[in-house]
Amino acid sequence: MELRLGLRRPSRDDIVALIKECEHKPQSFTFYPVDDVAAALSYRNWEEACDAAAWFWESLLLEKHDYTPEMDSNVSVTDSLDGRLRVLFTRHVMKVMEGKEVKRWVEESERLSKEIERVSTLLGKHLHIDLSNHYIEQRKGLVVEKIQVERRLKEFDSAMDCILKYLAEDADVEGADVEGDRSVNVFKFDGCFDWKRIHCLIRRECRRLEDGLPIYAYRKDILREIHYQQVYLCDGYVFLEGR
């Protein structure tokens, strides 16, 4: 099993300390931070390597390190490891969907609702026209901001639901990219579980939710238009199919 490099520069002491924490010790390991590999761990059999891989993934999801485990064996990856990682990643996604960043935006939405209600109450009073116009514009701005927050949360939930659907035991992999007549999922998966990619997608979505960029709230709308309004670029011209 190889431990792929993360963002931090690896050190032998870090690798040794990490291996000591793991219940499933390798028969031997080699530290060589070249290319994108931090270390290679050798195990006596597939079962031990499988147990170790599951542990390294679990600790990675808990952000105890940033090394990605990758199996390198003559034995093909079995349903056993994928099954364990499915459960592990599903729990992680569900935890993220109720995490502090989501709670922060939910609280912001509730704050905006209260502020909208307060301004609406003020508008119910007899006010000078200038002050009334001020509150009207303020309420409009608050409503727009609240819609942005709610759409951002909805987009994040949609992305996490897409991943959960893929991880489900009875997932229809071939059709996992489209649901409903006018709705599209944000990710497309093939039949093989690429755990590194799935992990990167989860981290990316969390980062985008945290950044709060306005365009994130409209990503699915953009994807829907791309999906249903096919665009072709030919010699600098844009053609909309069916338009």
Image (spheres, helix red, strand yellow):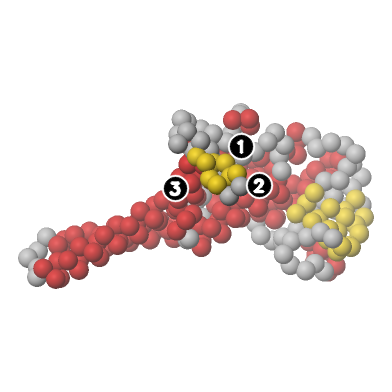
Relative depth, front residue between 43 and 185:
185
Relative depth, front residue between 233 and 160:
233
Whole-number angstrom distance, CA of label 3 to CA of label 2: 19 Å
**Which quadrant would residue 214 be assigned to in this image?**
bottom left
Q: Is 197 positioned to the left or the right of 224 in the image?
A: right
Q: Are marks 3 and 2 in contact (CB under 8 Å)?
A: no
Q: What's the residue type where badge 1 is placed?
A: Tyr
Q: Earlier in the sequence, mark 1 or mark 3?
A: 3
Q: Is residue 217 visible to us here? A: yes
Task: Give the residue at mark 2.
Answer: 198
Quadrant, the C terminus: top left
Note whether 153 is above or below 10 in the view shown.
above
Relative depth, front residue between 154 and 48:
154
Total numbered badges shown on the rendered structure: 3
Which residue corresponds to the image point at 70% horizontal and 33% vertical from the top-left?
Answer: 191
Please tell me how crowded label 2 is: few (under 14), some (14-19), or many (20+) other residues with Cα within 10 Å: some
Residue 39 x %, y %: 86, 59
At mark 1, the secondary structure is helix
Q: Is 122 positioned to the left or the right of 234 in the image?
A: left
Residue 221 x %, y %: 45, 45
Q: What's the residue type where badge 3 is placed?
A: Lys
Q: Earlier in the sequence, mark 1 or mark 2?
A: 1
Please tell me how crowded label 1 is: few (under 14), some (14-19), or many (20+) other residues with Cα within 10 Å: many
Task: Give the residue at mark 3.
Answer: 154
Which residue corresponds to the image point at 29% horizontal and 62% vertical from the top-left?
Answer: 141
Q: Are marks 1 and 2 in contact (CB under 8 Å)?
A: yes
Whole-number angstrom distance, CA of label 1 to CA of label 2: 10 Å
Q: Earlier in the sequence, mark 3 or mark 2?
A: 3
Residue 41 x %, y %: 87, 53
Q: Is residue 94 visible to us here? A: no
Task: Give the residue at mark 1.
Answer: 166
